[in-house]
Image (cartoon, rainbow, N blue to C red):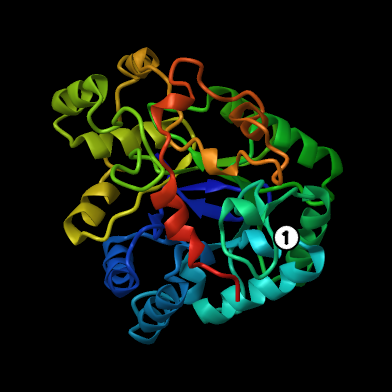
């Protein structure tokens, strides 16, 4: 299995990256340093994660210590939802580059089809309708300027990807979405493969314990556990290896050095092809439904509107009604 995938720009995105969502600022520095020392070459960041300055400090230290050079790493950042207006997009990436202490990022994503009023906190009352064509035009200018070596989207459904492709001068290189054995995104994966867009999986382990996520456990799934026992691997390693064999990069999050190293140990072995169909028996449930976005001001009147029908029917809305913790994580991440 290759340790990277080729994007439609010709650049390579590492097969595995370190996610920094929900890692405390005081812990992200050591997590990144340990990850890069262990072999990781992709660091996934965003202003919404409230630790991007610390990510930048870790990168600076790695470069100063000669552990890696800038060109050895693939750095992702994302557009803050309050800066969707075309005139604010370049300012947003310049702020991110300042935090990261970099001249460019390898990948810059629209964090989601979600917009809030400029200068406000991430609460439902501040939601507003997106204008993705206008925002994407500004993203294309960042690509032209070289401030982002590739541009893409996150949390885009099939319909939203198709709508974007219909107007894009520069097609998205990546769609970063929730994807794991419990929510396999088969339809979206097929679309992305047919249009040259790389599918990158956040929460490939199901993000256990993270606010806003609810539903069945990925790592506790009987099929995943059974396969891990057969292969003498951990459930996390099996979950990550499944993603690679499906053709997507994976972005697990951990601040624990042992787990960081363990998650990276997915290249010298594989899940036998005759065992891969066992994953088809796993009931599919979207774990991050983002119900907080369903609001009259957002233009999404239901989860079906937000995900364009790509919502499982079995779980339903009642499975997770409390999103206050999730909103609290974002409410203090005011744009700069």
Disc 1 packing (10 Å; few <14; some 14–19; many ≥20): many
Q: Which is nearer the eye, 311 or 332?
A: 332
Q: Which residue occupies the extreme bottom position in the image?
A: 64
Q: From the viewer's perspective, is residue 19 above or below residue 232? A: below
Tell me what residue is drawn at x 29 percent, y 42 percent: 208
Please name the residue that numbered disc 1 is placed on: 84
Q: From the viewer's perspective, is residue 48 above or below residue 287? A: below
Tell me what residue is drawn at x 75 percent, y 48 percent: 129
Tell me what residue is drawn at x 71 percent, y 46 percent: 297
Residue 276 vs residue 98: left or right? left
Q: Quadrant of the C terminus?
A: bottom right
Residue 140 vs residue 34: left or right? right
Q: What element carries label 1?
A: loop
Residue 269 vs residue 204: left or right? left
Q: In which quarter of the image is residue 105?
A: bottom right
Tell me how many marks there are. 1
Tell me what residue is drawn at x 59 percent, y 43 percent: 293
Q: From the viewer's perspective, is residue 139 above or below residue 130? A: below
Residue 66, image x and y in percent?
A: 36, 82
Q: In which quarter of the image is the N terminus?
A: top left
Residue 145, image x and y in percent?
A: 76, 71
Residue 188, image x and y in percent?
A: 60, 29
Q: Can residue 282 be seen in this view?
A: yes
Q: Is residue 269 visible?
A: no
Q: From the viewer's perspective, is residue 294 above or below residue 246? A: below
Q: Which is nearer the eye, 43 or 309?
A: 309
Q: In which quarter of the image is residue 98?
A: bottom right
């Amino acid at each position: 299995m290759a340790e990277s995938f080729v994007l439609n720009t010709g650049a390579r995105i590492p097969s595995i990256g370190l996610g920094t969502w929900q890692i405390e600022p005081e812990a992200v520095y050591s997590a990144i340093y340990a990850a890069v020392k262990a072999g990781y070459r992709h660091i996934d960041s965003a202003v919404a994660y409230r630790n991007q300055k610390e990510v930048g400090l870790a990168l600076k230290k790695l470069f100063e210590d000669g552990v890696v050079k800038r060109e050895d790493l693939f750095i992702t950042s994302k557009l803050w939802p309050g800066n969707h207006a075309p005139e604010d997009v370049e300012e947003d990436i310049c702020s991110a580059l300042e935090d990261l202490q970099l001249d460019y990022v390898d990948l810059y994503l629209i964090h989601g089809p979600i917009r809030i009023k400029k200068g406000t906190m991430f609460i439902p009352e501040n939601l507003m309708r997106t204008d993705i064509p206008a925002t994407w035009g500004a993203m294309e200018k960042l690509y032209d300027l070289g401030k982002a070596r590739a541009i893409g989207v996150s949390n885009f459904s099939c319909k939203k990807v198709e709508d974007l492709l219909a107007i894009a001068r520069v097609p998205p290189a990546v769609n970063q979405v929730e994807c794991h054995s419990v929510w396999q995104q088969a339809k979206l994966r097929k679309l992305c493969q047919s249009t040259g867009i790389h599918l990158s999986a956040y929460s490939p382990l199901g993000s256990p314990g993270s606010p806003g996520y609810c539903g069945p456990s990925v790592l506790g799934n009987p099929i995943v556990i059974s396969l891990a026992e057969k292969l003498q691997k951990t459930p996390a390693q099996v979950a990550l290896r499944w993603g690679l064999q499906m053709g997507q990069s994976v972005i697990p999050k951990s601040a624990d050095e042992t787990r960081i190293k363990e998650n990276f140990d997915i290249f010298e072995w594989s899940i036998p092809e005759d065992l891969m169909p066992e994953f088809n028996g796993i009931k599919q449930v979207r774990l991050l439904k983002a119900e907080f976005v369903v609001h009259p001001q957002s233009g999404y009147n239901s989860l079906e509107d937000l995900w364009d029908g790509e919502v499982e029917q079995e779980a339903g809305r009642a499975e997770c009604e409390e999103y206050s913790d999730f909103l609290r994580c974002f409410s203090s991440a005011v744009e700069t």
